[in-house]
Image: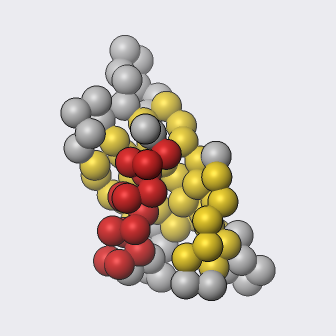
Amino acid sequence: MGFYEHNGSLIEVAVLSDGKEGSEGWVVEFWDLTPGGPGELMHVHVNTNGECVVDILDESADESFADWAVFIARSELL
């Protein structure tokens, strides 16, 4: 788990198992903890080959945020 600043927002990042039995994949959750912020923003699913799938959970997470989130997800898993 880590905390980051992105465009003035406090973002919490949590790395979790993907929950699939026998899988070595991960889910990286992104939460906006800024007072009045939207809360949970997105999940980045990372499989064992390093491929990422993004689930956007809040409309405020735009494409530039998704690109940043994928970069952070990969760096959290190194």
Residue that extends furthest to the right in the rendered view of this protein: 35
Identify the residue at horizontal 52%, vertical 67% (top origin): 41
The answer to whether 73 is drawn above or below residue 5 in the figure is: above
Any part of residue 32 in sight:
no
Residue 20: percent from the left, percent from the top?
A: 40, 25
Res 69 visible: yes
Q: Position of residue 44 (x, y in %)?
A: 39, 52
Q: On the image, which quarter does residue 22 sit in?
A: top left
Q: Quadrant of the C terminus?
A: top left
Would you say 1 lies left or right of 78 here? right
For the view shown, which residue lies furthest in the top direction? 22
Q: Quadrant of residue 9?
A: bottom right
- Which residue is more in the foreground, 63 or 71? 71
Q: State the residue at coordinates (28%, 52%).
A: 53
The answer to whether residue 69 is above or below residue 18 is below
- Image position, residue 40 (x, y; %): 58, 64
The answer to whether 37 appears left or right of 28 in the picture is: right
Relative horizontal placement of residue 53, taking residue 56 as reference (left or right)? left
Q: Residue at position x 67%, y 72% from top?
A: 10
Relative to 25, residue 13 above or below:
below
Where residue 15 sits in the image (x, y, percent)?
54, 42
